[in-house]
Image (cartoon, rainbow, N blue to C red):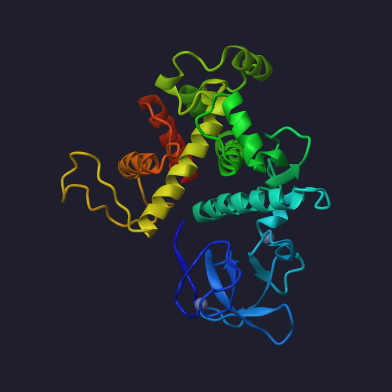
């Protein structure tokens, strides 16, 4: 993600901030400019204007600001009280139940990061009247995390760090996070949009396999025997070897991890070099909008040394690896497919 600075005083501010700690101005995320901006109160309570840029437009916070679950802005004249990201929620947890509020706040934080990336890519959040229609989120207890026909369901227990770690160990996963879940599940939605509806099924099947393969028996097989023995040659993760649809969703999630991380590294001025890379060939890297201009190869040229460096950094602190995966050549071609369909180049 890009860095943000207070548009009043210039101090560094963060994606989730609602107040500038230096100058005290109200802050909010502006989906129109995809930036955190400083606000000045308008005459009417609860309404604001930008301090720079389009100062005529009257804005207000998304209704979920009262729950500490959102800092995104909407136009005051918009009938919808929710921001473009919260508007995708169909079900939120029962906030009177203990633990639900903090779980939902964590989920919203991860979801905002996902939606930010989708907006940066210029991907639709609603394909109506064409299928799958609007992207919808259900956050609930006692439910299975998954995706069905445009609806992403997340069990809010995933926001419980102890439970998440228990499941990570139970399923022998190297990595499990809320953001990872949300990115993965969004992949199933965008498969319908960017592959199925775009007439790319044949190309998809040549790379990932036939998604019409029986899902239930693949799942049972996976839970009984674990990942396919040679999964490391063909997939980004063990779970990806379960079924072509999961291979796609895992690859999609990895692609979003990669683009967000490289974008953040660039914003922070971090450009680790691959061993043996010579100054003046491809390094120092040219600055690109990683959501628009990079080729997959140039992204990977940044991503691989970045992850090696960050893994080493994490080990220095005794943490688990930042990116505990290796991308085999076959998975690289799948990532290329994701890269090209997102950018309309397939
Ligand atoms: Zn400020
Ligand atoms: Zn909101
Ligand atoms: Zn899935």
Q: Is residue 217 above or below residue 86?
A: above
Q: Is residue 32 left or right of residue 301?
A: right
Residue 125 visible in rendering: no
Q: Is residue 346 above or below residue 203?
A: below
Residue 170 percent coordinates (x, y): 61, 24
For this orientation, the residue located farthest to the bottom is 43
Write the residue at 44% across / 76% down. 10
Q: Is residue 149 left or right of residue 114?
A: right
Q: Is residue 100 left or right of residue 337?
A: right
Write the residue at 60% across / 41% down. 186
Q: Is residue 169 above or below residue 46?
A: above
Residue 177 visible in rendering: yes
User: In the rendered image, which quarter is residue 268 located in?
Assistant: bottom left
Write the residue at 55% across / 24% down. 172
Which part of the image, by quadrant, shows the C terminus? top left
Residue 97 percent coordinates (x, y): 82, 48
Q: Is residue 8 above or below residue 154?
A: below
Residue 3 percent coordinates (x, y): 44, 63
User: In the rendered image, which quarter is residue 150 located in?
Assistant: top right
Residue closest to the eye, 86 or 227 = 227
């Amino acid at each position: 993600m890009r860095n943000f600075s207070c548009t009043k005083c210039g101090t560094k501010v963060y994606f989730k901030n609602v107040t500038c700690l230096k100058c005290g101005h109200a802050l909010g995320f502006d989906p129109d400019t995809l930036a955190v901006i400083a606000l000045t109160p308008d005459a009417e309570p609860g309404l604001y204007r930008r301090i720079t840029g389009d100062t005529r437009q009257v804005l207000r916070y998304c209704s979920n600001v009262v729950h500490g679950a959102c800092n995104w802005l909407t136009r005051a004249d918009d009938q919808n009280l929710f921001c473009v990201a919260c508007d995708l929620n169909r079900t939120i947890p029962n906030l009177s139940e203990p633990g639900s509020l903090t779980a939902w706040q964590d989920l919203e934080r991860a979801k905002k990061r996902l939606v930010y990336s989708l907006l940066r890519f210029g991907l639709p959040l609603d394909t109506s009247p064409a299928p799958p229609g609007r992207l919808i989120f259900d956050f609930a207890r006692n439910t299975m995390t998954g995706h069905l026909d445009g609806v992403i369901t997340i069990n809010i227990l995933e926001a419980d760090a102890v439970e998440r770690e228990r499941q990570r160990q139970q399923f022998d996963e190297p990595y499990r996070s809320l953001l990872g879940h949300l990115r993965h599940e969004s992949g199933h939605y965008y498969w319908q949009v960017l592959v199925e509806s775009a007439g790319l099924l044949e190309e998809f099947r040549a790379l990932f396999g036939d998604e019409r393969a029986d899902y239930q028996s693949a799942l049972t097989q996976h839970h009984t025997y674990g990942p396919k023995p040679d999964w490391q040659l063909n997939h980004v993760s063990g779970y990806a070897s379960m079924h072509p649809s999961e291979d796609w969703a895992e690859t999609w999630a990895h692609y979003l991890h990669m683009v967000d991380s490289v974008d953040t590294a660039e914003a922070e001025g971090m450009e680790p070099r691959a061993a043996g890379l010579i100054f003046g060939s491809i390094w120092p890297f040219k600055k690109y909008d990683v959501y628009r201009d990079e080729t997959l190869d140039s992204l990977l040229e940044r991503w691989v040394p970045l992850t090696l460096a960050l893994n080493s950094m994490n080990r220095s602190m005794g943490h688990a690896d930042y990116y505990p995966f290796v991308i085999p050549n076959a998975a690289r071609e799948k990532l290329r497919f994701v890269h090209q369909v997102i950018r309309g180049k397939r």
